[in-house]
Image (cartoon, rainbow, N blue to C red):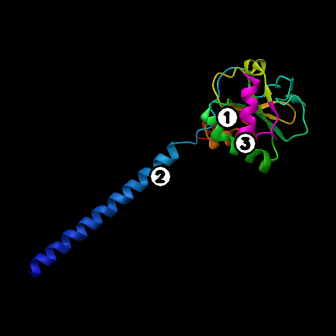
Amino acid sequence: MNEALVVSNILLWALVLALLVAVIALSRQIGILYERIAPMGALMMDSGPKVGDVAPVFELSDLSGAATVKIGGASNAKATLLFFLSPTCPVCKKLLPILKSVREAEGQRVVLASDGDALEHQQFRQRAKLQDFPYVLSPELGMRYQVSKLPYAVLMDGQGRIRAKGLVNSREQLESLFTAMDLGVASVQDYLEVHA
């Protein structure tokens, strides 16, 4: 009986030591994967005005028709985030609270842009409580920036230069535009390529 107890104790300790070695090996692999997988910034498409170019200037009527919205050129704002969206885009709707946060916490100017039926956009603006945002409808604006997929964002500095742009599907990708502007690079991926 004593021998069986001693043998089972030895086997249990061997198993515990083997599990400890496995946990250490797995945690090392997790660390290696973490270093290899860089944060994914906004997907920059190679079309439209380039990062660093002066943004094209547009003066468009707001969706309500009560005001004119100037996009591009020098402004009093720290930066202007031009956000292309659609009332039928579920990812766009998911990013709306983040845009509100960017505008309020960071003091950035956020302009919503789209094209299509004005009545549909007015109803969407009402439902999503976007009355505080400048909201413009302009097919020319989307064509000038060559927006092919939504949601798409263009970040311009106070002097009207494009500092970052790209397809944004998450908070991290939206924030990567501001990070790229702060770092003085076209995208987070460009920064990682240089500093990897």
Residue at (14%, 78%) from the top-left corner?
5
Residue 154 appears in the figure: no
Q: Which residues are magenta?
A: 117-135
Distance CA(mark 2)–CA(mark 1): 25 Å
Q: Secondary structure at mark 3?
A: helix
Answer above or below: position of 24 versus 29.
below
Counting labels gives 3
Image coordinates for residue 113, horizontal then vertical, percent = 76, 29
41 left or right, relative to 129: left
Residue at left offset 38%, top offset 54%: 26
The numbered dot on residue 187 is: 1
SS for dot 1: loop
Residue of label 2: 31
- State the residue at coordinates (80%, 38%): 133
Of residues 68 and 56, the one drawn nearer to the viewer in this rendering: 68
Please tell me which residue is depicted at 73% across the width and 29% down the height of the picture: 121
Q: Quadrant of residue 63?
A: top right
| Camera sees residue 90 | yes
**Kind of residue sitting beneath label 2:** Gly
Tag 1 or tag 3, which sits nearer the N-term?
3
**CB atoms of marks 2 and 3 within 8 Å:** no
The x, y position of residue 178, in whole percent, is: 73, 41
In the image, residue 195 above or below residue 14? above
Task: Answer whether residue 107 is magenta in the image.
Answer: no
Residue under label 3:
99
Amino acid on which disc 3 is placed: Leu
Rendered location of residue 103, percent (x, y): 78, 45
Q: Residues within 10 Å of mark 3 (few under 14, many from 20)?
A: many
Residue 30 in the figure: left or right of residue 125: left
Q: Earlier in the sequence, mark 2 or mark 1?
A: 2
Q: Determine the image quadrant of residue 28.
A: bottom left
Q: Quadrant of residue 54?
A: top right
